Amino acid sequence: MRFDLHRRILLFLCVTIPLSHLDLPIFYFPITEQELIYTINKNLKNASPGQDNIHATMLKNLHENSLSYLFSLFNNIFSSNTYPLSGKTVIILPFLTPNSDPTLPASYRTIALANVLGKLFQKILNKRLLWFLESNNILSLFQYGFRKDRTTTQPVLDLQNEIDQSALTKSSLYSVFFDLQEAYPRVWRHHICNKLFDAGLRGSLPSILQSFLNNRTLIVRIRNSTSSLQ
């Protein structure tokens, strides 16, 4: 049973690991070449580059020697438990929303450009983290966003079903809707790390995540002008 479980895990992560190591959780292991190649080909989108000016198409056409160097680089970062400072800087592009006051900061929609190498590394870690959260049933059954085989349309259908049931039984149904403004930057990062630790996440993965969340910086770019590091 244990072997079958780990075999499914390894297939999901596209990882090849010696059978003698199957008793250890998957997130303890170094990044494998299979993970790297699979993520480049299947999960890396052709988005605009960040400060490093490296495009995703470059990584998808890497020479075998360059791919080997990238593999070694990622594992050195993983084993050091420290996310590089250069990978924690994003370029912010502000765009004025239609019919808005240009003098108000809230009138701008922003796009963040991050280094493609950093995105690749994060996608590899994210796949491992999602496996840990899903396989241990840590995520709420009512969380639909950012999960495989789930969409935010599902809670709308669930609500419609509740409405239909209330109409059939002629009972009352009360719903509360609320929106958290700027929810992402308001998240308490230290609490996230503590929750992952309490859930049993150990090894290099939580250390890298904590390093990734701390000391982040940004640069604002408007046309050909850029701000200082913030």
Image: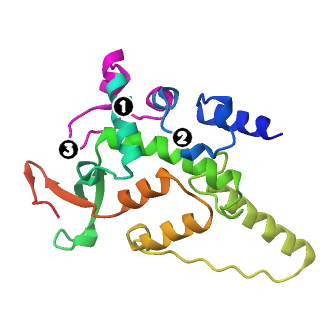
Q: Nearer the viewer, residue 72 or 230?
A: 72
Please tell me in which quadrant of the rendered image residue 79 appears. top left
The amino acid beneath tag 1 is: Ser
Q: Amino acid at mark 2?
A: Phe
Q: Which residue is mark 1?
A: 72
| Image disc number at residue 29 | 2
Crowding at mark 3 (Cα within 10 Å: few <14, some 14-19, many 20+): some
Query: Quick check: 140 left or right of 61?
Result: right
Mark pair 3, 2: CA separation: 30 Å
Query: Which numbered disc, 3 or 1, marks the residue that appears first in the sequence?
Result: 3
Q: Amino acid at mark 3?
A: Gln
> For the point 17% across and 58% down, which residue is it?
220
In the displayed orientation, state which residue is furthest to the top: 64
Residue 79 visible, this angle? yes
**Nearer to us in this view, 60 or 190:** 190
Q: Quadrant of residue 138?
A: bottom right
Q: Residues within 10 Å of mark 1 (few under 14, many from 20)?
A: some
Instruction: Count neighbours of disc 2 (C-alpha within 10 A) and say few if under 14, some if 14 to 19, many if 20 or more.
Output: some
> Looking at the figure, which quarter contains the N terminus?
top right
Residue under the image location 33 percent in, 20 percent down: 62
The numbered mark, 3 or 2, whose residue comes first in the sequence reads 2
| SS under mark 2 | loop
Question: How is the structure coloured here?
Answer: rainbow
Q: What residue span does the magenta drawing correspond to?
A: 37-66
Image coordinates of residue 60 in percent, x first then y, are 37, 23
Q: Does the image show residue 97? A: no
The residue under label 3 is 51
